[in-house]
Image: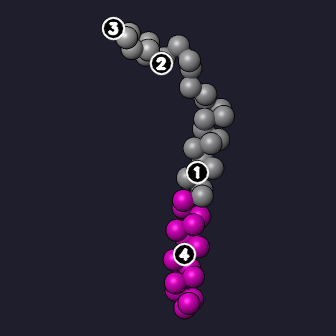
Amino acid sequence: MTATAVVYMVVAMVTVWGGLVAALVNLSRHPEEVEDEPAPPVQL
């Protein structure tokens, strides 16, 4: 692999993993509240 390909691969990996880490940090700081969930459907 050329140096350019390696640089693009590293940038892509940092973007993907960085987004994952940012999402996990955001969820840990602001967890979803249970009371916002809709009621389960009623079976007839």
Q: Earlier in the sequence, mark 4 or mark 3?
A: 4
Residue under label 3, please give it. Answer: 44
At x 51%, y 77%, the residue is: 8
How far is disc 1 from disc 4 in space, using C-alphas?
A: 17 Å
Report crowding for label 2: few under 14, some 14 to 19, many 20 or more residues within 10 A (C-alpha). few
* In this rendering, position of residue 29 left or right of residue 43: right
Give the label on residue 20, or none.
1
Question: What's drawn in magenta, residue-wise?
Answer: 1-16
For marks 3 and 1, give the one nearer the viewer.
Answer: 3
User: Quick one: which residue is furthest to the left in this view?
Assistant: 44
The answer for how far apart the CA atoms under marks 4 and 2 are is 39 Å
**Amino acid type of disc 3?**
Leu
Q: Which residue is mark 4?
A: 9
* Disc on the earlier residue, 1 or 4: 4
Query: Residue 12, percent across and down?
Result: 52, 68
Q: Which mark is residue 37?
A: 2
Picture coordinates of residue 29, whole percent (x, y): 65, 32
From the viewer's perspective, is the residue at label 4 or at label 3 nearer? 3
Circle 1: residue type: Leu
Q: Which mark is residue 4?
A: none
**Quarter of the view holding residue 7:** bottom right
Q: Label 4 crowding class (10 Å Cα cut-off): few <14, some 14-19, many 20+?
A: few
Q: Amino acid at mark 2?
A: Glu
**Percent position of residue 25, x then y:** 65, 41
Q: Is residue 4 above or below residue 40?
A: below
Give yes or no for residue 22 being in the magenta stretch: no
Identify the residue at image location x=55%, y=52%.
19
Return the residue nearer the eye: 1 or 14: 1
Residue 14, magenta (yes or no): yes
- Compare marks 1 and 2 and give the one earlier in the sequence: 1
Whether the residues at callouts 3 and 2 have beta carbons within 8 Å, the answer is no
Neighbour tally class for label 1: few under 14, some 14-19, many 20 plus, Cα within 10 Å? few
